[in-house]
Image (cartoon, helix red, strand yellow):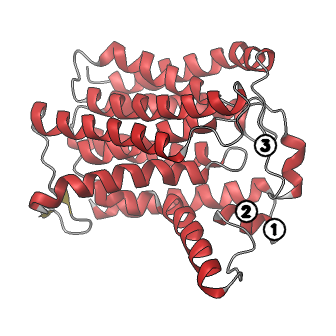
């Protein structure tokens, strides 16, 4: 069991890398092409028709690998459930968009109900069937925890759903969400191994799956992850945070997710109170930098480097 985390990386990477050349032509055959917004950056119009729902690669790789280890590492189960649960909500949304040809996907309330249901089951399982406390490690204060008592469950809902939608907003450029989340997965892998938490196979499986997926998703992307991948990754990050009692660390390692969400909230709020004025050229934040003249590859590289540095900071804070 000592080197299972290395095995998990290799198995998951292999599944993802080898499945890509099979899945991508199949998605093209199904005509699961991305529809690009007319009001988005003009450079993105050439991406119209690129297959989406590639997050199936990530989900399949993480799930298959985790199932190999779950008997010996039962702590994997809650993280895997949250990952797959949010992934299924995203898959339904993608299916409605690209197969049913309804550009907006699921109705907002349908997506919200799905996310609430998945988060509710996760919270119930965590409190009833694990010995993981909802008290949170405080960054930079070793051995100290923050416990909100009766507010722990509402805060859990807020963090889990906020994290899932943060990754969703980050998925807007080739390789961006995958590269950023790869850094986060490595951080949680190091933290899981260092604390002997028992979830390291699933964190390493996510890292391997993302490395395999990025072979096909870096610029110019052959496939997009869609909501299937972005929501699944958000569930993965939140699940790891709670299983390690480190949800407060998500604000550090997921600083890009947070910046993307805040940019949208600030843009919409300021637009309404100012009567049509904008702070950013476009939200989420990565589109602002695009319209400032940055290339996709530069934005992806800079955001990934920032995440890597924040992950190092978070390791220092443990």
Callout in the foreground (1, 3): 1
Q: Are marks 2 and 1 in contact (CB under 8 Å)?
A: yes
Q: Which residue is mark 1?
A: 291
Q: Residues within 10 Å of mark 3 (few under 14, many from 20)?
A: some
298 sits left or right of 92 in the view:
right
23 sits left or right of 119 in the view:
right
What kind of element bears circle 1?
A: helix
- Residue found at x 12% / y 47%: 133
Q: Which residue is mark 3?
A: 219
Image coords of residue 131 (percent x, y): 9, 37
Label drawn at residue 287: 2
101 is higher (above) or lower (below) than 310: above
Q: Quadrant of residue 185 in the image?
A: top left
* Quadrant that contains the C terminus: bottom left
293 is higher (above) or lower (below) than 159: below
198 sits left or right of 279 in the view:
left
Q: Is residue 190 visible?
A: no
Q: Quadrant of residue 64 in the image?
A: top left
Image coords of residue 207 (percent x, y): 49, 35
- Residue found at x 80% / y 72%: 292
Image coords of residue 222 (percent x, y): 78, 31
């Amino acid at each position: 069991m000592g080197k299972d985390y290395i095995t998990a990386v290799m198995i998951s990477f292999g599944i993802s890398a080898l499945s890509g050349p099979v899945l991508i032509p199949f998605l093209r055959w199904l005509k699961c092409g991305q529809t690009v917004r007319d009001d988005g950056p003009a450079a993105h119009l050439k991406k119209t028709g690129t297959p989406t729902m590639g997050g199936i690669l990530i989900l399949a790789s993480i799930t298959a690998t985790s199932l190999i280890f779950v008997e010996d590492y039962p702590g994997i189960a809650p993280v895997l459930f949250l990952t797959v649960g949010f992934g299924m909500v995203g898959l339904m949304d993608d299916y409605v968009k690209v197969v049913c040809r309804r550009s907006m996907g699921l109705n907002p309330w349908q997506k919200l109900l799905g996310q609430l249901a998945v988060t509710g089951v996760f919270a119930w399982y965590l409190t009833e069937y694990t010995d993981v406390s909802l008290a949170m490690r405080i960054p930079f204060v070793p051995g100290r925890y923050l416990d909100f008592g009766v507010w722990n469950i509402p805060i859990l809902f807020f963090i889990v759903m906020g994290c899932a939608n943060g990754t969703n907003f980050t998925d807007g450029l080739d390789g961006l969400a995958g590269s950023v989340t790869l850094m986060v997965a490595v951080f949680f892998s190091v933290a899981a191994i260092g604390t002997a938490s028992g979830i390291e196979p699933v964190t390493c499986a996510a890292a391997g799956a993302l490395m395999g997926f990025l072979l096909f998703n870096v610029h110019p992307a052959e496939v997009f992850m869609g909501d299937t991948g972005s929501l699944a990754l958000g569930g993965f990050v939140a699940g790891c945070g709670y299983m390690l009692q480190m949800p407060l660390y998500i604000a550090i390692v997921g600083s890009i997710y947070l910046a993307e969400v805040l940019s949208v909230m600030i843009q919409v709020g300021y637009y309404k109170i100012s009567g049509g004025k904008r702070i950013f050229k476009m939200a989420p934040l990565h589109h602002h930098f695009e319209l400032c003249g940055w290339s996709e590859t530069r934005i992806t590289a800079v955001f990934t480097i920032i995440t890597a540095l924040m992950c190092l900071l978070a390791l220092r804070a443990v």
